Image: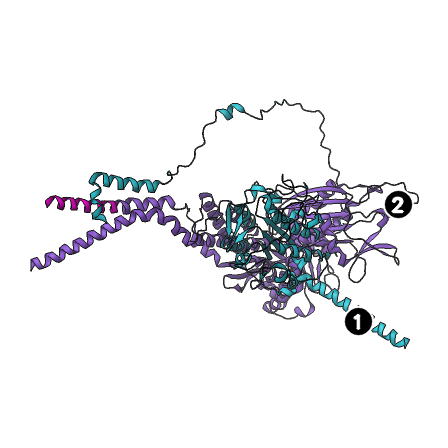
Chain colours: A purple, B cyan
Amino acid sequence: MATTEVERRRGQLAALSIAAVVIIVGVPLWWRTTETYRAWLPVSQIKELAKLQLHLSADVEVVFARGTVTPEQQKKVPLTQTQNMEHRVDEDTALSYRYETRYRTATIMEEDALNQPTAAEADLSLHTLSESPSGSLVVYVIPESSSLLPQNVDVYIGQRRTALLRIGSQMRVGKTLEQLLAHMEPRIKQVLHVMSFSHTDITAALSNRVRISPGNKESIADSMRAFKSSPGYEITFSLLNPDPKSHRLHWDIEGAVETYIQPLLTKLSPVANFSIDSQTLYYAMLGVNPRFDSSRSTYTLNADSLAHVINPVEARLGSNAASSNPVLNFLLYIPDAHHSPLYIHDHKKQQVPTNAFHSPRWGGIMVYNVNEFYEVDTVFPVDINIDMAKVMGVFLAQLRLLLGVQSSTPPPGFLVAPCGNAGLADWELDRLMWSRSVENIATATTTITSLAQLLDQIGNIVINDNIAQQVSSAVTSLQLAVSELEAGNLGFALQYSKEAILSSERAFFDPSLLHLLYFPDDQKFAIYIPLFLPMCVPILLSLLKIVSEARQKHREKKPKKD
Amino acid sequence: YVRGIFKNLHGWFINCLRYLFCCFQDRAGQFFSSGHTNNWAVLVCTSRFWFNYRHVANTLSVYRSVKRLGIPDSHIVLMLADDMACNHRNPKPATVFSHKNMELNVYGDDVEVDYRGYEVTVENFLRILTGRLPPSTPRSKRLLSDDRSNILIYLTGHGGNGFLKFQDSEEISNVELADAFEQMWQKRRYNELLFIIDTCQGASMYERFYSPNLMALASSQVGEDSLSHQPDLAIGVHLMDRYTFYLLEFLEDIHPASKTNMNDLFKVCPKSQCVSTPGHRTDLFLRDPGSVLITDFFGSVRKVELTMETINLTDPIEQLESAESGELQKEMHTYADQLPVSEIIHQKPKQKDWHPPDGFILGLWTLILLVFFQTYGVKHLKHIF
């Protein structure tokens, strides 16, 4: 009897020890060997970034020239005012704009500069005096008697960051400084709207984050036309010669790019990198047959058929296989001798003066007529030198439109200086930098938050260390960008936002984040049951037997005790 | 009497002019109604083997229509799981016909296949959609769409309830596909997406979609099989599937300027012709299908604006200095050994990650149980059971 008792005890001990091994050693071992490696992500900081609060601030300096303020008003100047405007775009995004306006009187050198004969020269000499940092503005208030501006123009916006504002007659007499400032305020607001960030631009830049219903047709067209923010762009200039038997074309594309396009691209280098190439295509036809207009004896392409021109040509344009940057194509088409001259007509059957059209987010095409190079008895092929200044003028205008530089029409009474040889005014660059920074920040925050959400939802994706590192650096860059934007350091804000975009895109599009491990629950059971059930059943049953025997013994003991 | 006729003609002419004017207005309105600036197409044939000739022909017919309507090759990702044109069993090599009596060769001279043969896998398909391709992938193998792209996705092959079979060895489930589309939406990789699937029980593949701006068409409902159209006795296999055959017939009538809309596409291949019931899903799509043009997805109609401004450039072109220097510098070059055999032969084995051997857990438990029974004998079994 004792031996069976011993044996039974041994059996119970064996069963208990097996159960112990299973639970203490087996279960953790199985857990460790089947878990996926997930590096730590700064989830709380990402959640904070999901609620985006952007503060944009601009410094404005208003300089009163002699003759605009009375001496007693002059005593109260200099002063500083701050204006704050808050906008809530949606429940996750809030914007606040801050304008710090500093008022002062003009120095003697500035007065001399303002005494120049024309506004353009005044602008140039003011620029040589002091260079305003990017993001800031200077408004010079000139008296009504000044002859700098023509009669019906009140505001002149220069090529750099200055504007000239002419005071009207009713502002001067016997008013206090506060009244004068209040009177000038709508004009200054208009200047700020044109030269610095405006609410419409900033909300358009947030379109990645917020699905806003656009207001009117112009804003839809604007948002569709410009390329999205990208770290680099490729520009390709193509010369299409459908008729090499008649025309032998020479274009000095290298010189033209160096002289006309490169200054703009150098100025835009904080915004993006550009790579340029050029090519010549022979026997490349337009896909549309032009119509002969007998009244003007020219061939015409009307605006409706232009949409079908691009597709047949695009198949023949190459692109740089190595990069995934967006491509801007600029095509120069020389019509063949049988279809010269070729003019583009708009919807009202008027000739388009530039003879060019562009397609949103693609590029532009210009038709260059060469029939004036024909003499009376020309021997084909004719050698033709293309006037690159005219061609590049059009391409530069199209490039500005496609990059989003062009702003809306200015309010009445405004005169905007032509943008000069760099192709871009400083304040236009500032506007572009504001909207690009905001767009980059919006895109990067959306990317990071959706990545965090994705990784949270799908428990099977492996998160490597490099992804965690990219995410952390993206979060850091984003926080820095937002703070720099608040401080008004536009250059730094753009740079940090670009870094944030790069890191977030690299993290999101990392090839290792592919979720191919979708197992429906019934498949999971089907895998584990044949493995674990056969060995768990005896263990469980033996444990149950031990427990029931112990209970029985306890019950037997009880009456014995009594 | 003549004057009456003249009056009628005059009235008709006026009405014509008015209609044309409205057309101009409508076209301007169309610019803003679709909201896309470029078109992409991802066309996938997932089956291999000679007897699945019809799936390759399906995909190639859609490829042809899409190219004819204007989408360039750089914007089409074509994935064919097997090569039918150069298959040993093809009696007419270098051709893939879609119609019996060899009427239409859809292979043509300028087919650009981006993923061929064994490259067509579920992983690659999902990588294309989500954009998670290795950095060495060339441009032609990527889907470089942006938030203003309309994408057409066409899948064909053998499928079942909730899955589509790839290469006879793996499958993609409808949940994975829906998740991939959601990731595309999160990253704003499409403006609108049209999903067409021609497989058995195709409607199950779009059941799980939950991202906005998706429209889906399938050739058959859950529980139904999609049938093939007609065999060709000379080639010996079925050439096309019914749904895609009638779809191709429908698309042949579309030209780049046509105004046919999606409601006509939903009517393609009714049950009388297709035997299966085609289905479609438009609840996630924001616009009304009646206002969506076929060419919004199958073609590539560019929006165009006239350039009204030009910049006056006055600087003359600088003459670039010629890059020739005086004397030519001579450098010694050596022939680089292209195949360093000695390094290859004496290569050290690569360090692989350590994995526990297969069946480790099984073996562990078997060992424990064996030890137990060895020690205490089989008679203790009754203590357990």
Q: Which residue is drawn at 54% across and 25% down?
A: B340
Residue closer to the observer: A162 or B333: B333
Q: Main secondary structure of the magenta part?
A: helix
Q: Where is residue B71 in the image (x, y as percent from the top left)?
A: 67, 51
- The image quarter containing residue A101 is bottom right
Tell me the crowding category of disc 2: few under 14, some 14 to 19, or many 20 or more residues within 10 angstroms, Cα based.
some
Residue where numbered disc 1 is placed: B15
For this orientation, the residue located farthest to the front is B233
Residue A14 inside the magenta-drawn segment: yes
Q: Viewed as shown, does residue B29 lie left or right of A243?
A: left
Q: Position of residue B218 (x, y in %)?
A: 58, 58
Asked if disc 2 and disc 1 are in contact, CB closer than 8 Å, the reply is no
Three-letter amino acid code at the position of disc 1: Asn
Q: What are the residue bounds of the magenta stretch?
A: A1-20
Chain ID at mark 1? B
Q: Are marks 2 and 1 on the same chain?
A: no
Residue where numbered disc 2 is placed: A374
